[in-house]
Amino acid sequence: MPLAGFDIAVIVFVVLVILILFAGIKTVAQGYNNTVERFGRYTRTLSPGLNLIIPFIDRIGARMNMMEQVLDVPTQEVITKDNASIATDAVAFYQILNAPQAAYQVNNLEIALLNLTMTNIRSVMGSMDLDELLSNRDAINDRLLRVVDEAASPWGIKITRVEIKDINPPKDLIDSMARQMKAEREKRAEVLEAEGSRNAQILRAEGAKQAAILEAEGTREAAFRDAEARERLAAAEAKATEVVSEAIASGDVQAINYFVAQKYTEAIAAIGTARNQKIVLMPMEASSLIGSLGGIGAIAKEVFGEGGSGSGSAPRDRGSVPSAGHRDDQT
């Protein structure tokens, strides 16, 4: 059955409506923003989701990635402040915050950011010495981040991080640095060894000083105690001499015999214990010593006899002790 003109018109109208709907309905993926241009001029930005535009009048201008992106900075040669040539590379992280600015303020955004980062790396690292570059990498990263972020801000870009990956000096410079580091470590070792030796000598001197002080104090204490002992011994000798003198004054002959026999016995003991004497010649009578010992025994009997029997027991005649001495003379 042939279609009438009205039917054809309806079909054409439906197809046209479908085409218009497809042309006016735009879907934006998550993490992206699309700019809308009307007759070549920016009008608005489409956010993620379902959006409507005027078909055949508006069109999608630029599709911008709003997620954080990575920019790999290739290796380049840098001359430091002290004229050392090094090779360095880096990595930068950036994020688009304003899609229209990133789309219309700069042409080829990634190349612009790459050249901006490389230029600032040469500028920042070229103003520093090699030792600073090798020891202050965090400071270099912070300075690069601040400079590049400030330069990229008009483009609607936020530089989140700039990291220096490698700093490679020439091989001869690395060898020189190794020799310098070795010499520095040897110098530190010698300084530490000298300080340790000095401290050890100081400690030994302090120990000797304290030992001398303690030894002097011990000698002084020993001398003091020795003098005190001699003083007490002299006092005891004086007291004994005084007692013997009083006994002699009172006519007690036994006290004389006791005193002489004690000294006699001590002298014989000293002669007998001398180390340099092997044979002792005694040009005296042994009976004299026996008589003296007999006098000592008589005194002891008299003393202990009086203490044991009390007032009722009569003491032995004092003349018997000298008779022992008399027997010694007769003998």
Image (tube, rainbow, N blue to C red):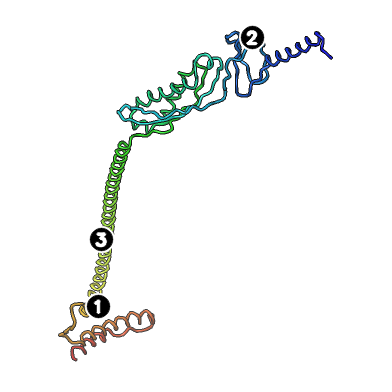
Q: Position of residue 31 (x, y in %)?
A: 60, 24
Q: Position of residue 319 (x, y in %)?
A: 25, 85
Amino acid of disc 2: Ile
Q: Position of 70 compared to 88: left or right? A: right
Outermost residue, bottom direction?
Answer: 331
Specify the quadrant of the image occupied by residue 73: top left
Outermost right residue: 1
Please, which residue is most extreme toward the front here?
A: 1
Task: Residue under label 3, please give it.
Answer: 223
Amino acid residing under circle 3: Ala
Q: CA distance from mark 3 to mark 1?
A: 29 Å
- Say which residue label 2 marks: 57
Q: Earlier in the sequence, mark 2 or mark 1?
A: 2
| Callout 2 secondary element | loop
Residue 262, which numbered label?
1
- Relative to 235, residue 181 above or below: above
As measured in the structure, the alpha-carbon distance from the residue carrying label 2 to the one carrying label 1 is: 148 Å
